[in-house]
Structure formats: structure tokens, C-alpha cells
Image (cartoon, grey):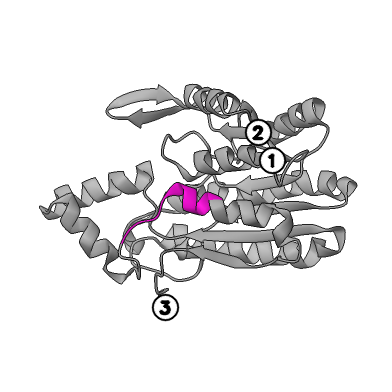
Amino acid sequence: MGTLNGKVALVTGASAPKGIGRAIAQRLAKEGADVVITDINGTFKQQDIEVTRADLLESLVQDIVSQGGSAIALTLDVTSARDIAAMMEHVLTKFGRLDILLNNAGSLSGSDNFLSTSPAQWTSSFEVNLLGPMMLSQAVIPEMRKLGGGRIINIGSTGSLGAEPGFGAYTAMKHGLVGLMKTLAAEFGPDGILCNTVCPGFIATDMHEAANTRLSQEQGKSVAEIKQSRYSNVALRDAGLPEDVANAVAYLAGPDAQYVTGINLPVTGGVPFGI
């Protein structure tokens, strides 16, 4: 018996082949949850080939089912109230409940020198990184109340806890996400709804590997040299894996965390936080 048998979990931003969302969906399904995996309508560049996110979600569903799990895929723009309402109707019609919300969808819009970022970039970052989780939380909390409890788990960042140059919009929204979750933990704790944030550091995702390659080209260094430089402040001197984040999520979603709410859980390999 898995720790999440009989539970239904929603994971946003789950299409990336080496993404945190995918690893989380796989882990929650392994624990016995019926998993609803979502992402926006669009494409993902994989080894210079563009693949639709819908196809990537379907491949994840097939992978989960082949391992004996249960999953469905839905297109969801987390900034769209209409999409969220349609998703909730679909999930409740099919499963009759929603126990776990995993807010993973995110955007690096506005990742540039502060003076170079535009209001439009900040607005985009706000809508995906903070407004989306807020809207989804508003949608699921009434259903969780009916069940007598639930779990809302956000994927934050070391940018939720500190700061580094060039990530003003992202850092501001990830700090805001922590504030939102602490508020929800306090407000809905009496309803049995636990709200926490997992804060990854360097994780070997598609996005992270692409950043290492870009920095290598810009600085005229090898990827190995870039990694050595970037990880020099990491106690374990390496990037983590998406599965490391998924392990933390599984803990917070499961029965062992029944008295844990309002926390930030770093999964960083020991990164000292900034200012």
C-alpha cells in the first residue's frame, strides 16, 4: 500500500522531460495517488526538436500507467480563471475529490539586470509565479474543506529565501509565494489544510542544463568549468536531481508530515542563502 492511496494530486508545469514536475508526478503516482498532470498549450524544445507539451504530458501518463500508476493529462494555463474552472470540473467529475495541489509551474520572465527589465516582464512573472498559485489555491481549498483537509505544496527556490543579481522579478515573486503559503497555513490550518514550500537549489533539469550551456558559450569556458564555478558555494559541490525535490514533496504530501505546515524546506545540497 502506498502512502497516498485513495488521494488525488494535481501537478502543474509537468511536461518538461527532465523537469521537477515530471519527477514529482511519478513519485506521487508511485505512492498510490491518482495524478492529474498539467501544463500550458505550447511546445518544448528537446535536442533542437520542438515537441508539443501535450505529447510530453501523454508520454508521462503512459510512463506512469506502465509502472502501475494512475494519471491523466490536462492542458492548463495557471493564469486563466476559465482554464482553472474547467480543470476543476473535469477532476471532480472523474475523481470526485482533490487532496493535493502541487504548484510547480513557473516563469523566469524578467531574469535580467534590474534596470533592463520592463513592467510587462514583471507582470508576466507575477501572473505565473504568484497569481497562478493564488488562483489555484482559491479553487481547491473549498474542496479540501469538504474532505476535512488537504495539502498545498509550492515549488519555490533559493530565490524564495535569498537573492542574487539578475533575478529581480523571479526573486520577488518567489518571496511572495512564501508569504502566501504562510498566510494559507495560518488561515486554513483549522480546516486540516497544510501548506508548505519546497525550495530547490541547483537541480539538473532541462532548464538548468540549458543555462549551463549558455553560460559556457558566453564566457568561453567548458560546461565542466561552469559547473565547478556555479557549484563552488554548494556544500555537496554538485547539482541535485529532480527526484531529490520529488522526495521532499512526497514527505510533505504524506502522513509523516501531518503536523508540518507553514515551512520552507530547502533542497539545495547546502547552499548558503544570500542577503
Q: In the visual, does 167 lie left or right of 266?
A: left
Looking at the image, can residue 130 be seen? Answer: no
Q: Is residue 143 visible?
A: yes
Q: Is residue 242 magenta?
A: yes
Tell me how far mark 1 sits from mark 2, CA to CA. Answer: 6 Å
Q: Position of residue 10 (x, y in %)?
A: 66, 39
Give yes or no for contact between labels 1 and 2 (Cβ–Cβ under 8 Å).
Answer: yes
Disc 1 target residue: 9
Q: Amino acid type of disc 3?
A: Ile
User: Crowdedness of circle 3 by 10 Å Cα count: few (<14), some, many (20+)?
Assistant: few
Q: Which residue is mark 2?
A: 36
Badge 1 amino acid? Ala
Asked if the residue at tag 2 contacts the one at tag 3, i.e. Cβ–Cβ closer than 8 Å, the answer is: no
Instruction: Please tell me the numbered disc located at residue 275.
Output: 3
- Of the two numbered discs 1 and 2 on the same chain, state the one appearing first in sequence: 1
Label 2, residues with CA under 10 Å away: few <14, some 14-19, many ≥20? many
Relative horizontal placement of residue 171, taking residue 84 as reference (left or right) = left
The foreground one among 72 and 113 is 72
The span picked out in magenta is 238-246
